[in-house]
């Protein structure tokens, strides 16, 4: 299977995973190519991908956005260390679900533990990247970044 087919499978699997993990209405925008660096302004979670394709998934939003998702899923707003822990676990749930989804389409991947990044940062070091903007009802926008290393 070609790299472009793997990427398409992972993007489609990410959309399916978001819809199954986050219990809110969402509007998935079209993916687009992005260039280095990825500039984070507030909060994101990064999960490494290894296997048939190598790269990273970054789920980027605001702390308020992640808190609203947490409030919907757990019935209470989250802040501080609880919010950071939830953000990592949300990334883990989405990426874990993605692994299960794409294997049915012939793509074998595994994930690394999530890394939560808080504050302003810039990420370099990827060959290709795709961004997938998602508008979630009552939350706002989150952006899924898929970086490809090879």
Image: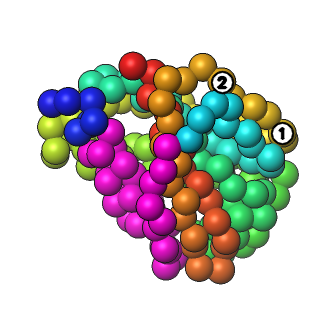
User: Which quadrant of the figure has residue 95?
Assistant: top left
Question: Residue 148 in the image: x percent, y percent?
Answer: 44, 28
- At label 1, counting other C-alpha atoms closer than 10 Å, the crowd grade (few under 14, some 14-19, many 20 or more) is few
Q: Are marks 2 and 1 in contact (CB under 8 Å)?
A: no
- Label 2 belongs to which residue? 124
The quarter of the image holding the N terminus is top left
User: Which quadrant of the figure has residue 102?
Assistant: top left
Question: Residue 94 in the image: x percent, y percent?
Answer: 46, 50
- At label 2, counting other C-alpha atoms closer than 10 Å, the crowd grade (few under 14, some 14-19, many 20 or more) is few
Which one is in front in this view, the residue at disc 2 or the one at disc 1?
2
Q: Which residue is drawn at 66% across and 73% down?
A: 139
75 is higher (above) or lower (below) than 17: below
- Label 1 belongs to which residue? 120
Coloring applied to the structure: rainbow
99 relative to 60 in the view: left or right:
left
Q: Which residue is drawn at 44% across and 61% down?
A: 30
In front of the other: 121 or 78: 121
* Residue 63 included in the magenta stretch of the image: no
Question: Residue 122 in the image: x percent, y percent?
Answer: 75, 31
Q: Which structural element holds mark 2?
A: loop
The number of numbered badges drawn on the structure is 2
In front of the other: 76 or 31: 31
16 is higher (above) or lower (below) than 73: above
Q: Which residue is drawn at 78% across and 64% down?
A: 64
59 relative to 98 in the view: left or right:
right
The quarter of the image holding the C terminus is top left
């Amino acid at each position: 299977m070609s790299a472009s087919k793997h990427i398409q499978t992972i993007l489609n699997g990410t959309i399916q995973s978001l819809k199954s993990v986050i219990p809110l209405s969402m509007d998935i925008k079209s993916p687009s190519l992005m260039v280095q660096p990825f500039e984070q302004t507030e909060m994101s979670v990064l999960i490494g991908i290894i296997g048939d394709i190598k790269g990273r998934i970054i789920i980027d939003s605001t702390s308020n956005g992640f808190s609203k998702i947490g409030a919907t899923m757990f019935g209470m707003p989250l802040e501080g260390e609880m919010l950071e822990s939830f953000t990592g676990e949300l990334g883990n749930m989405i990426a874990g679900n993605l692994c299960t989804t794409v294997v049915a389409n012939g793509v074998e991947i595994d994930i690394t533990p999530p890394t939560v990044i808080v504050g302003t940062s810039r990420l370099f070091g990827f060959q290709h990247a795709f961004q997938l903007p998602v508008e979630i009802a009552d939350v706002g926008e989150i952006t899924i970044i898929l970086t490809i290393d090879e």
